[in-house]
Image (cartoon, rainbow, N blue to C red):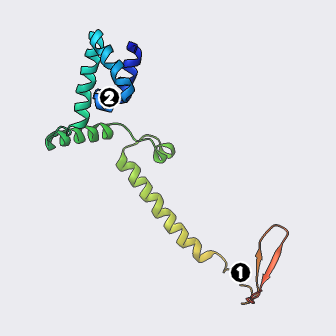
Amino acid sequence: MTDEDFLRHLDDYGASPDRWPPELRAGAEAALARSPALRSAADKALAFDRLLTGSPPMVEDARIDRLLSAAGAAARAVPQDGLVLLLLGRMPRRTAAGFCAALLALGWLTGGWLAGTLPAAAPQAARGQELALLHDEVITLFDGEPR
């Protein structure tokens, strides 16, 4: 077994010889016996395997709180680009919020004013005879009778 083959199999199967296929174990042991570099690589792989199989390290709550507050402060420091920025440009958030609230109130007042001045809705078709446009050239009459 060449050094490259051993390193590839070490990556594939890990450092534990029990996980290696039986036909590769004898070649791996011979390669380990002749090369100190391969023994070093196997030791590093064994340490990595122990790290993966062990329990995760405990992280204290204060460290998590510091990390979250630092991430939140960094996010608040960066201006948020969005629809408001596109429409209004860069302005303080309170000013943008007040402007949006004023636009909402203006739209509500305008809608109420226009509702009183628009003509009444068109008369409905007689009940039981309604037209439906299913396609550009096909008009169907629905009279409520099953077919």
Percent x, y for residue 14?
32, 28
Which marked residue is nearer to the observer: mark 1 or mark 2?
A: 2
Looking at the rendered structure, the kind of residue marked 1 is: Ala
Percent x, y for residue 78?
35, 36
The residue at which mark 1 appears reads as 122
Q: Is residue 124 left or right of residue 40?
A: right
Q: Residue at x 31, y 15 (%)?
A: 30
Camera-side residue of 135 and 46:
46
Reply above or below: 144 against 25.
below
Reply above or below: 127 against 138.
below
The residue at which mark 2 appears reads as 14
- Mark drawn on residue 60: none
User: In which quadrant will I find the N terminus?
Assistant: top left
Reply above or below: 91 against 7.
below
**Residue 47 placement: quadrant:** top left
Q: Is residue 91 left or right of residue 33?
A: right
**Residue 120 placement: quadrant:** bottom right
Looking at the rendered structure, the kind of residue marked 2 is: Gly
Question: Residues under labels 1 and 2: Cα distance?
Answer: 78 Å
Camera-side residue of 107 and 129:
129
For the residues bearing labels 1 and 2, Cβ distance under 8 angstroms = no
Camera-side residue of 120 and 136:
136
Percent x, y for residue 106?
49, 63
Q: Is residue 142 left or right of residue 77?
A: right
Q: Is residue 142 left or right of residue 30?
A: right
| Residue lying farthest to the right in this orientation | 137
Q: Residue at x 36, y 29 (%)?
A: 22
Classed neighbour count for the residue bearing mark 1: other residues with Cα under 10 Å, few (<14), some (14–19), many (≥20): few
User: In which quadrant will I find the C terminus?
Assistant: bottom right
Give the secondary structure at mark 2. loop
Query: Which one is earlier in the sequence, the residue at label 1 or at label 2?
Result: 2
Camera-side residue of 22 and 97:
22
